[in-house]
Image (spheres, helix red, strand yellow):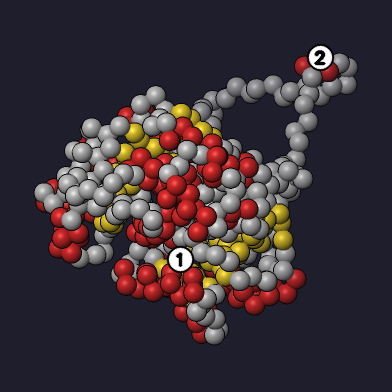
Amino acid sequence: MFAQFALHERLLKAVAELNFTEPTPVQQAAIPPALEGRDLRVTAQTGSGKTAAFVLPLLNRLMGDALPRVTIRALILLPTRELAQQTLKEVERFSQFTFIKSGMITGGEDFKVQAAMLRKVPDILIGTPGRLLEHLNAGTLKLNDVEVLILDEADRMLDMGFSEDVQRLGKECANRQQTMLFSATSGGNGLREMVASVLREPVHLKLNSVSELNEGTRQQIITADHNYHKERLVEWLLANETYQKAIIFTNTRVQADRLWGKLVAAEHKVYVLHGEKDQKDRKLAIDRIKQGGAKVLVATDVAARGLDVDGMDLVINFDMPRSGDDYVHRIGRTGRAGGEGLAISLITHSDWSLMSSIERYLKQRFERRNIKDLKGIYQGPKNLKASGKPVGPKKKKVDKKDAKKPGAKAAAPKRKPTARPNNAPSAVVSQDGLAPLKRKKPAAE
């Protein structure tokens, strides 16, 4: 029960109002040290309840009597607009019985309207690094009195090239008293460097190893001959699988638009979401999916983070993601909060090596599947072991001792090149044996 935590009664009232009963493992592990003011480094799978794990301790810290707002007291950094909007909604839900106010700054919105909001000085500011830096450079944002800095989906911010921006914003919050960093994966050297630079003697909480991520999601692959074959497989899956809502990932905007057009022509209720869509269209697509006006969303990786849709129980990778971490975040759109889901990746010969490397990264082996009516020619590399690794003919090893036994075939002796007479016909082979030499004509006598 949440009552076990030393939370303010108004926060417990909000928790009860929202029908939160048992804390999730990440909440159970992270809330107590966060309430103590410790810096945290938390790795936990998508959909595990990370947002409440940092929002509740943050709100508890900021609780007090209603006073005039003169400084921004907390900053939450996120990689995408969609995730920022989702986090803002969660903060507002948990703070509904308090005097705490929050605001959001992301790209794609009117800069002057955002500056006016900043002049009202929200207690908690939620935003994406790029637009926050624009306001910082314009002098409309001051962060020197921030008490708590939270980096959510930190690994994704690094993937999107926000490392320097995050470091700059962290330095602007120089007087902060607590920093919490959350991510779904352990990341690489870049994330370790960020942890070292922004956290002070942190508590490390690793709730899942990468092989345990998305345990409630079945993971399958279907081989395909080419992209047109993939498009037919997608149509078959949407027509025959049982699902409430589905998301189909592509690696490019061009492919996303093409697939969207194909599915619309096949009379599917589908929306498309990618980086070239303006904020109005992106919000419309997400709202329609959430409200049930459409069952299918075609998206690039811009939607792999921050998209929390109830009933999203089918993920199709039209294109295999470029890394294991991206794969984890894609399939994390389904099987959330302990639910079950299905993730299907469509694999051509050019995708096989990438798919195999992701299997090794996850220490898992995906279920192989064929659709009888659409079975292609390509079925993976030839001569596969049970492990899925290609094999070739074994070379027979010859023991050196056996080579000396009677009857053993002796190696042919090397022949020394012999000189040819001047009148030898045709071309002469050079002594290195690599190229023919043209025979010179004899000099005139």
Above or below — where is 291 with respect to 387?
below
Residue 367 falls in which quadrant of the image? bottom right
Residue 131 falls in which quadrant of the image? bottom left
Question: Considering the image in quadrants, where does the N terminus appear?
Answer: top right
At x 14%, y 63%, the residue is 112
Mark 2 residue type: Lys
**Which comes sooner in the sequence, label 1 or label 2?**
1
At x 29%, y 49%, the residue is 124
For marks 1 and 2, give the one nearer the viewer. 1
Residue for badge 1:
299
Question: Any mark on residue 408, and which?
Answer: none
Rendering coords of residue 85 (x, y %): 37, 60
Mark 1 residue type: Ala
In the picture as drawn, the residue positioned furthest to the left comes out as 139
Above or below — where is 387 with respect to 102?
above
Residue 114 visible, this angle = yes
Residue for badge 2:
401
Residue at disc 2, secondary structure = helix
Q: Nearer the viewer, residue 380 or 107?
A: 107
Above or below — where is 199 with respect to 84?
above
Rendering coords of residue 21 (x, y %): 58, 51
Q: Nearer the viewer, residue 287 or 257?
A: 287
Rendering coords of residue 104 (x, y %): 28, 57
At x 64%, y 77%, the residue is 239
Q: Is residue 156 left or right of residue 211?
A: left
Q: Nearer the viewer, residue 436 or 442?
A: 436
Residue 158 visible, this angle = no
Instruction: Calculate the distance from the C-alpha at mark 1 to the C-alpha at mark 2.
Output: 64 Å
